Image: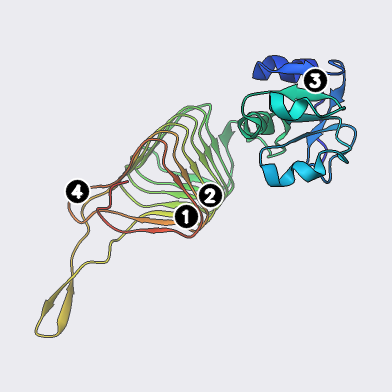
Amino acid sequence: MMSATVYTLGQLAERLGATVRGAADKPISGLATLQEAGADQLSFLANAQYRKFLSGCQAGAVLLTAADAEGYAGNALVVGNPYLAYAELSHLFDRKPQALPGVHPTAVVAADAHVDASASIGAYAVIESGAQIAAGVTVGAQCVVGARSVIGEGGWLAPRVTLYHDVRIGKRVVIQSGAVIGGEGFGFANEKGVWQKIAQIGGVTIGDDVEIGANTTVDRGALSDTQIGNGVKLDNQIMIAHNVQI
């Protein structure tokens, strides 16, 4: 899919600290695989098993190591790690809609919740009593942010994320749709075959720069908090039990 933004190879090289081989003024409007890239797109070679596609590649340019660039006749950006370079440039061509600051008129925000003026609160979202939403946070449509929960600067919640009460989230945390953070841990005491529920009175603490995949669940702690440290990345449909530390 094409991006609305166009960069020259020279501009991309400057951003990456890469060396241009070929036409520095070549316009690039998107990213694609070696097999599918067209004349206005940038591709990359990061795995040796795909080197067989390089000779027939129709890309406007390719991210290559110095060794691979030696045998390539087309335009190239020479970098030490093509996959890392691709990861960085992917954000330039990301077409994900950017939320605008403000609270949607259908959202419900408790009178004593704090929502920074730069945050975006989507349609039918619920922000409960005592919650704190920091600068630059996006809370998607139909999300629930429970009582006294905190979302740090630059956080992004996709639609339909649920945070129970007393969940503390650090800065720049990404949580995908359907995730549930702070649900009750599975705790029961047995007395003569009868199971008595144990109140889960801990919370969940999540560090900075964490990503949590779609439909993943993180249970609250029984007494102390379940803890997810800085930089942790969780894929979709993972279950993190109560009191786990990652």
Q: Residues within 10 Å of mark 2 (few under 14, many from 20)?
A: many
Front position among marks 1 and 3:
3
Residue in view at x 39 percent, y 39 percent: 111
Determine the image quadrant of residue 228: top left
Question: In the rendered image of this protein, does residue 89 appear above or below residue 47?
Answer: above
Residue in view at x 51 percent, y 56 percent: 236
Residue with the mark numbered 3? 9
Is the Cβ of the residue at disc 1 closer than 8 Å to that at disc 3?
A: no
Tell me which numbered mark, 2 or 4, is placed earlier along the sequence.
Answer: 2
Residue in view at x 78 percent, y 25 percent: 70
Secondary structure state at the residue bearing disc 3: helix
> At label 3, which amino acid type do we have?
Leu
Residue at mark 2 to residue at mark 3: CA–CA distance: 33 Å
Secondary structure state at the residue bearing disc 4: loop
Residue 16, image x and y in percent? 66, 20
Is the Cβ of the residue at disc 1 closer than 8 Å to that at disc 2?
A: yes
Tell me which numbered mark, 2 or 3, is placed earlier along the sequence.
Answer: 3
Q: Nearer the viewer, residue 13 or 158?
A: 13
Front position among marks 2 and 3:
3
Residue with the mark numbered 2? 176
Residue with the mark numbered 4? 224
Residue with the mark numbered 1? 179
Tell me which numbered mark, 1 or 4, is placed earlier along the sequence.
Answer: 1
> At label 2, which amino acid type do we have?
Gln
